Amino acid sequence: MPKTLPWQAVALCVDGSSADALLDNMKAFDITKSNTMACTMCVNLDTHNMRYRLMECSSEACATVSLLGCRWRGKTLTCIL
């Protein structure tokens, strides 16, 4: 069973343009997993989905410094309503 990572919230309940600006200011990353799942973020009682994405560092600077690679991970949850 995969280990649980201690996630730290950076931004909650932001609009799409603010979220895009925040992601643009982060290090280079690749999306390693992108799935839909039942939404657990909003108070809307209608059944709908959210997009769950896992990201990992793809920065050239990190790759050249460490042979083991960068341990940075990211996760985004986006309501699809």
Image: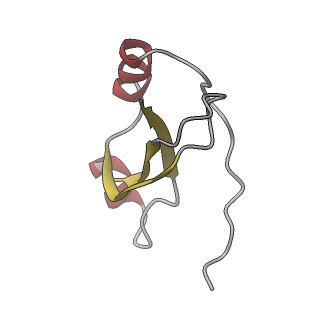
Q: Looking at the image, which is closer to me, 24 or 9? A: 9
Q: Is residue 58 visible?
A: no
Q: Looking at the image, which is closer to me, 42 or 13? A: 42
Q: Position of residue 61 (x, y in %)?
A: 33, 48
Residue at the image position 62 percent from the left and 43 percent from the top? 40
Q: Position of residue 1 (x, y in %)?
A: 63, 86
**How many numbered discs?**
0
Residue at the image position 50 percent from the left and 47 percent from the top? 75
Q: Is residue 75 left or right of residue 13?
A: left
Quarter residue 66 falls in: bottom left
Which residue is farthest bottom? 1
Residue at the image position 34 percent from the left and 25 percent from the top? 24
Residue at the image position 27 percent from the left and 50 percent from the top? 60
Q: Looking at the image, which is closer to me, 46 or 54? A: 46
Q: Is residue 25 visible?
A: yes
Is residue 31 depicted above or below 1 in this figure?
above
Quarter residue 26 falls in: top left
Q: Position of residue 74 (x, y in %)?
A: 50, 48
Q: Looking at the image, which is closer to me, 41 or 1? A: 41
Which residue is farthest front? 46
Position of the C terminus by quadrant:
top left
Q: Colour mode?
A: secondary structure
Q: Is residue 7 left or right of residue 20?
A: right
